[in-house]
Amino acid sequence: MDLKKTLNEIKLLKKKVQHLSEEIESIKAISLEGPSIVEHRLKMRRIQVLRKNPTDRLFFPPSLLPFYKVRFYKMMKRYSFRLVLRDMVKIQDQFCVEDLTHYCSSKVVQGYCDLLFKMGAIKDGKGKYRTTVSPLYSFGPTLEWFIAEMFKREFATPALYGVSVKKTPSGGDYDVIASWNQRLVYVEVKSSPPKGIELSEVARFFLRIEDLQPEVAILFNDTQLRMKDKLVVMFEEVLEKNYGKQSKAIYPVERLIEELFHVQHRIFIVNSKRDVVENFHICLKDYIRYSPTPFFKGK
């Protein structure tokens, strides 16, 4: 009887600890929001936010517990997890483990499915899974959420994702905007591989920079493929079109390290090779290392 009583007390204690952990994560999540700082910096530029942080297009339901949101964020740091989620978004209804093994083993995929099922992000029906949120049109919004969370949790930086602002010449939609180290940072998030990114998208990225005038701008492509073969080339094409043939001399697209590139240490091309958080850290540190200068002067 004493042993049974002790085991019951241990179970009760574990539940209390889990409950406290969830409450702590809720408090952390609230403290990390701080969107007013980002909106204040935008207002200083006479830019009005119309929409921010939409939850209806994310992979997980809006009701997901803060404790699980933290777990989901930590899992999103894994490239293989993000690839599996992409496949889930493509199928959405009636998928099994074998449908998701393009990039990792069935054992790893099963572990991801078990976790997502426990969270309530996917549902199990007769041996087949389906996403809880349906329809899901793209993995992009969830990736934007992840980058905004990364700024909050890794860089103690307020950030917004899925931002729509009052009409600007470039269209007024921004994937992620953060207020880092008293600087405005704009991140364009691309979930497609480089071959799926068009020249017009890179041109719009530069137009949004002109509208927003951030101190730092980053084009993040969630891939481990080379940036030099296509994205760097498209950057050079857009710069030449905007600023003439002298652009390569004035605004060269230079390699920072491996597959990270920069223009004047203020505009960066970033991919997922090795580690997303570390790649962003390298770019932000590079910006700090060099004295800021205006993005572009006239022709």
Image (tube, rainbow, N blue to C red):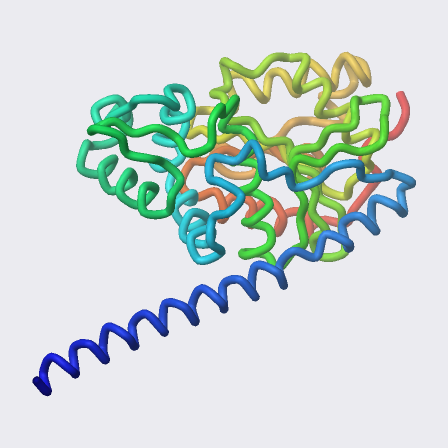
Residue 24: percent from the left, percent from the top? 50, 68
Left or right: residue 266 versus residue 70 is: right
Q: In the image as oriented, which residue stretches furthest toward the bottom? A: 2
Residue 248: percent from the left, percent from the top? 71, 21
Q: Quadrant of residue 171?
A: top right
In the image, 261 versus 194, the foreground residue is 194
Residue 128: percent from the left, percent from the top? 25, 27
Left or right: residue 257 versus residue 294 is: left
Q: Answer above or below: position of 50 versus 198.
A: below
Q: Residue at position x 47%, y 20% from top?
A: 193
Q: Residue at position x 50%, y 19% from top?
A: 194
Q: Quadrant of residue 116?
A: top left
Quarter the C terminus occupies? top right
In the image, 10 versus 83, the foreground residue is 10
Q: Residue at position x 90%, y 25% from top?
A: 298
In the image, 54 versus 215, the foreground residue is 54
